Amino acid sequence: MCTDKIQVRKIHFGGFSPSHRFKNQAMRILKYDDDLMYGDYREDKKAEIPNYTSYPFLKSGWTVPFVTGHKYKIHWGTVGLDFDRM
């Protein structure tokens, strides 16, 4: 249930360089809050950590909604991509 303190912000990722590395690569996002990653985490609970959500590449990059007040881990492609600018 959302309260009036919860906000969703749309963020556009674009202007990437070198551009050829990002073409048709998915943007992968994982909610990475401290309580999810470090709270009561034990090796036997590894399967309970949420999976990445993938967003497909669009013409000018990726536009993604984020809930404010949370941490996210973001990478591109299947193993991550190195870039100079975004």
Image (cartoon, grey):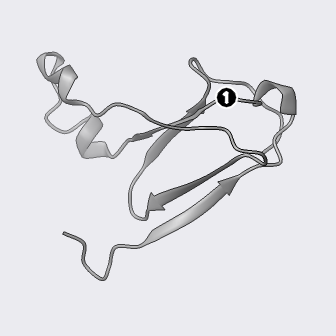
Q: Residue at x 67, y 38 (%)?
A: 57
Q: Nearer the viewer, residue 59 or 7?
A: 59
> Residue at image x 34%, y 73%?
6
> In the image, is residue 69 above or below residue 43?
below
Image point (85%, 33%), residue name: 19
- Spot occupied by residue 55 in the image (x, y as percentages of width and height): 54, 40
Residue 63 vs residue 30, the one in the foreground: 63
Structural crowding at the residue carrying mark 1, measured as other residues with C-alpha within 10 Å and reported as few (<14), some (14–19) or many (≥20): many
Displayed quadrant of residue 77: top right
Amino acid of disc 1 = Gln
Residue 33 position within the rendered picture, expressed as x and y whole percent measured from the top left: 33, 46
Q: Nearer the viewer, residue 79 or 54?
A: 54
- Quick check: 74 left or right of 34? right
Seen as rendered, the residue at the extreme bottom is 4
Query: Left or right: 83 with respect to 12?
Result: right
Location of mark 1 (residue)? 25
Instruction: From the top left corner, tell me how far across and down residue 43 is, in percent.
Output: 17, 16
Quadrant of residue 21 in the image? top right
Q: Residue at x 76, y 49 (%)?
A: 14
Instruction: Classify 82 as above or below 28.
Output: above
Q: Tell me: residue 9, above or below residue 84.
A: below
Question: Please, what secondary structure does the residue beneath circle 1 have?
Answer: loop
How far across and how far down the image is residue 13, in percent?
69, 50
Residue 82, image quadrant:
top right
- Quadrant containing the N terminus is bottom left
